Amino acid sequence: MSASLLSSPIIREVHRSPATHLRSIMATCVDNPQPKPTMNHLCMNPTRSKIEDSLYRYVALSRPGLQDLVFSPPASPAGDETWGRIREEAREDAEMEPVLRKYYEDSILSHGSLESALARHLATKLGSEIGSDVMEKVFREVLESAPEVGRAVRADLKAARDRDPACTSMARCLLYYKGFQACQAHRIAHRLWMKGRVAMALFIQSRVSEVFAVDIHPAARIGEGVLLDHATGVVIGETAVVGENVSILHNVTLGGTGKVGGDRHPKIGDGVLVGAGTQILGNVRIGDGAKIGAGSVVLKEVPERATAVGNPARVVGGKAKKEKEEMPGISMDHSSWSDYVI
């Protein structure tokens, strides 16, 4: 420390030894037997000058208070309405159920973005065999380098909220809905597959199958706004393609018809609704806005805006009019367009 700094009255005061400092105070009290000056709570040394007091007060006020040292959750990125809404819902749940407060803090409220929260949550679910920290790093790398994955994540959250009457909160969908979680893990695995990281992509597929009972090959292509409702038993093969705004219920297979390689799996158009227990086999196309009834076995192409039911499936009812009917993958209407009568 320079001599000029050491000559400063404040520095001298700070570097004075405790014994010297005590003797100075005692001497002051003996030489000046008068009422003690009022102690300043920001400056506990009554011997300082007004100038020194002002400087110490400035330093004290500039230091963080206790409330600043206590954890404060990061603010939501500007313009990310989905993430802002998720944080609001998480705070509401934490207030209603205090025993889950730390869980919501760790899973959502301590994170600065949806991507960060999703990476941590999926890693906690899937990373037991290589460690959740390692898995989280892999997930973060993909989510940070591929903004299109983040867009799909938000579209899937909104799809669940809008189409599933049991889903009243995107925060709960993020934390508790395994169909959503399985789909997002697949999106990450698909990016790794496309980058040539085949072993890591297959590892994620394997863990998703074990944990969520959903088996999606990492090469399969899935569009945005997809709802895997309940999701248990969903199987999607390597060359399958699923369009945008598609809804698929539990125990659905998009599979092949044998051991022949090549392009061998179904192609599902936009806005398609696939009912529970449906098996769609082979390289067949399901047209945009089509509807497949529960329990059907589909082996042939289904035209757009048509409804197919049965085993083997056949087209029933009339073709919906585009200008009047909402896409069934969005409306979740399982009953209209059909001439089936009991």
Image (cartoon, rainbow, N blue to C red):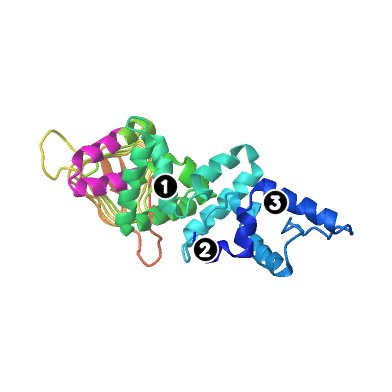
| Image location of residue 275, percent across then percent down | 37, 43
| Residue in front for this viewpoint, 305 or 51 | 51
| Image location of residue 178, percent across then percent down | 42, 39
Sort mark 1 into few (<14), some (14-19) or many (20+) by Cα contacts within 10 Å: many
| Image location of residue 23, percent across then percent down | 74, 49
Asked whether the viewer can see residue 46, the reply is yes
Q: Which mark is residue 21?
A: 3
- Determine the secondary structure under disc 3: helix
* Predominant secondary structure, magenta span: helix
Residue 94 lies in what quarter of the image?
Answer: top right
Q: Which of the two discs, 2 and 3, labels the residue nearer the N terminus?
A: 2
Q: State which region is magenta.
A: 185-206
| Residue in front for this viewpoint, 249 or 178 | 178
Residue identifier under label 2: 3
Residue identifier under label 1: 118
- Disc 3 marks a residue whose amino acid type is His
Badge nearest the viewer, 1 or 2: 2
